Amino acid sequence: MLANLLPNVQWETMWAATVETLYMTGVAVAATFVLGIVLGLLLFLTAKGNLWENRFVNTVIAAFVNIFRSIPFIILIILLIPFTTWLVGTMLGANAALPALVIGAAPFYARMVEIALREIDKGVIEAAQAMGASTWTIIWKVLLPESLPALVSGITVTAVSLVSYTAMAGAIGAGGLGNLAYLEGFQRNHNDVTFVATVLVLVIVFIIQLIGDFVTSKIDKR
């Protein structure tokens, strides 16, 4: 029955493409989470009136974040081809998509981190300073714990965006469900392949959103 409805779908190939998409998304989300928090913390801490106030550093980081989060992802991939080839040794395959995925998503997440940190009550930070807490103690014991629900919610939104980024990356040979939908579905006019790949991408997105919402609800004590 299924073979009649979806005659062109090769399930082993579809599964391999799904694993590639999950691999690209998982690695990119982990790297984006770390890099985004670092950038977001620097944006917040170096802003006027904060612990590491430094106008020059803040301007440089803000410019980097604004530039790279504004470039359309498909253009960013093309711009990064020389860098990707130097770093990975090829511009094809799942690993070749990772630099563009991280560089495209981290600045976006960094802004979400900065916004989350700005929402923290200034009085809590001032109280920690009055008690003699060092900057690193304030970061680990105040800033990150207080903003954690927003950070998890933000990385959930970013992870969903990264799934769509992997699909776009697949159009130029990065592998995954996007690559399969483009090569096997679109170019060969196999609409059933495109349909199944789309459904699997949606399933991945729904699972990510459910996990993100569940974790956020568990850690949000408000």
Image (tube, rainbow, N blue to C red):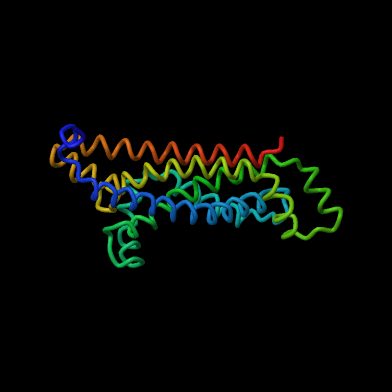
Write down the quadrant of residue 23 in the picture: bottom left
Eyeballing the image, is 4 above or below 17? above
Q: Residue at x 59, y 50 (%)?
A: 40
The residue at the point 67 percent across, 50 percent down is 144
Residue 7 falls left or right of residue 115: left
Residue that extends furthest to the left in the rendered view of this protein: 188
Of 27 and 74, which appears nearest the observer? 27
On the image, the x and y values in percent for residue 36 come to 54, 52
- In the picture, the quarter occupied by the C terminus is top right
Count of labels shown? Answer: 0
- Identified at 21% across, 39% down, the residue is 193
Q: Position of residue 137 (x, y in %)?
A: 75, 58
In-image side of 80 versus 135 (left or right): left
Residue 206 occupies quadrant:
top left
The residue positioned 35% from the left and 47% from the top of the image is: 166
150 displayed left or right of 205: right
- Residue 139, above or below 120: below
Q: Where the N terminus falls, by quadrant?
A: top left
Q: Position of residue 51 (x, y in %)?
A: 73, 54
Measured as percent of width and height from the top left, residue 54 is found at 66, 56
**In the figure, residue 88 lies in which quadrant?**
bottom left
Q: Residue furthest right?
A: 131
